[in-house]
Image (cartoon, rainbow, N blue to C red):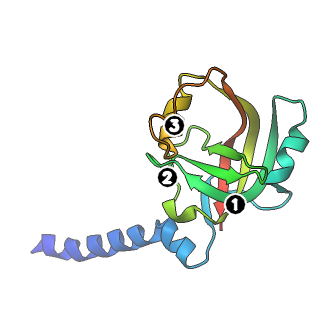
Amino acid sequence: MALRNYILPIFILSGVYGCSNQPAANMALGKPIYIGERINEEGAIDCSELKEKLGDAAEMDAKVKGEVIGICPDKSCELKMDMEDGTCLVVKMNNMAVSIPRDATGKTAIIEGRAYVDTTSTKLLPGYKMDSGLSASESEVTSDPEVSLAFNAKGVIIR
């Protein structure tokens, strides 16, 4: 008899908790999603300006906004943003075990953290190319490592 008195409150509390932690539902309602540290949009530069701001430096702290053009297909642990020059900025989540909503593609993201020049070895390139949808023959090994901009985010807003 006493156990029955506890079952209803447990179901109610679990329902309230489950509904309050759904970022995809927030995005569908037009509410921004905050991932990692709570950041704001003030002072964010456009993604296309990042290369110019970085200049010859190997890394810098930055706050950047731009369009999300892809999400990591395996674990939703990183996103790609359009640099508006045919390249993309790979954004990793500062060693946090977070999941970026898969329907964030096409949305605007504001990221804050550390931008840096990243070199991908020739051993890793074929795997990354296959992850992006290329066939095994299209992703054959290249002789030169790939140098690109990357970002280690401590906080992300998706809207």
Q: Earlier in the sequence, mark 3 or mark 2?
A: 2
Q: CA distance from mark 1 to mark 3?
A: 27 Å
Q: Is residue 133 left or right of residue 143?
A: left
Tell me what residue is drawn at x 43 percent, y 46 percent.
74
Image x and y of residue 127, in percent: 49, 33
Location of residue 10 in the rendering, given as x and y in whole percent from the top left corner: 28, 70
Q: Nearer the viewer, mark 3 or mark 2?
A: 3
Number of callouts: 3
Mark 1, Cα crowd under 10 Å, few <14 / some 14-19 / many 20+, is many
Judged left or right of residue 41, residue 2 is left
Residue pointed to by mark 2: 99
The residue beneath circle 3 is 138
Can you give x and y, in whole percent of width and height, for residue 117 in the image?
A: 75, 31
Q: CA distance from mark 3 to mark 2?
A: 29 Å
- Between 81 and 62, the one nearer to me in the picture: 81
Q: Residue furthest front?
A: 137
**Dot 2, crowdedness within 10 Å: few (<14), some or many (≥20)?**
some
Which residue is outermost to the left?
A: 1
Q: Mark 1: which secondary structure?
A: strand
Q: Secondary structure at mark 3?
A: loop
Amino acid tagged 2? Ser
User: Residue beneath label 1, please?
Assistant: 67
| N-term-proximal mark, 1 vs 2 | 1
Instruction: State the image quarter where residue 34 is shown.
Output: bottom right
Q: Nearer the viewer, residue 79 or 12?
A: 79
- The kind of residue tagged 3 is Glu
State which quarter of the image contains the C terminus.
Answer: bottom right
Residue 147 falls left or right of residue 93 = right
